[in-house]
Amino acid sequence: MQHLINIGLVERNPGHGHPLRPEFRLTQLGGAAAELASQIAGVAKEADQDLLRRSWTLPVLATLHSSRHFIEIKRDLSPITDRALSQSLKTMEARQWVCRQVDEFTRPPRSRYLAVSTGGAISEVAASAVTFGA
């Protein structure tokens, strides 16, 4: 709970609750995050919730609203490691949330990734709300 308070999503409700059982409410930022989470939950099926709960699934999907190379995704998600990004993309590709296309006309051949089906729908919702700073 303290982490949610520290990042500004939740605050104590002043004048309400017992000191040992305080009451909390969403901040304006917390409300926006809850709305985004609700939209994403509305797009994904119950069976997809396990994949959505993984650390990098949502950030990776937010970058895949258009076809991107591995290095472009990694640049937007600077703290992600090559291994974590690769595993995340492979997992989503196996679930058919991401389509991998190999551009054989470049040397060396390079892969491009694009969110499709459920991944594409989640990507549209997330991309409209998430921005990546330089």
Image: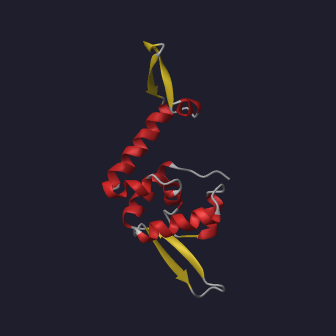
Q: Residue at (40%, 68%) from the top-left corner?
A: 95
Q: State whether residue 76 is above or below residue 129.
A: below
Q: Is residue 103 above or below residue 15?
A: below
Residue reaching furthest right?
Answer: 134
Whether residue 23 is situated above or below residue 8 in the rendered picture = above
Q: Is residue 43 left or right of residue 12?
A: left
Who's the residue at 53% across and 55% down the image?
59
Could you say which quadrant of the image residue 121 lies in?
Answer: bottom left
Q: Is 126 placed left or right of 133 in the picture?
A: left
At which x and y percent is residue 9?
A: 51, 33
In the orientation shown, which residue stands out farthest toward the front?
Answer: 20
Q: Residue at x 52, y 53 (%)?
A: 55
Q: Position of residue 78 (x, y in %)?
A: 66, 56
User: What colour scheme was applied to this rendering of the protein?
Assistant: secondary structure
- Is 22 rendered above or below residue 53? above
The image position of residue 34, as x and y in percent, is 42, 39
The count of marks equals 0
Q: Nearer the viewer, residue 86 or 10?
A: 86
Q: Nearer the viewer, residue 101 or 131?
A: 101
Q: Nearer the viewer, residue 53 or 77?
A: 53
Residue 123 percent location from the top left of the image: 45, 58
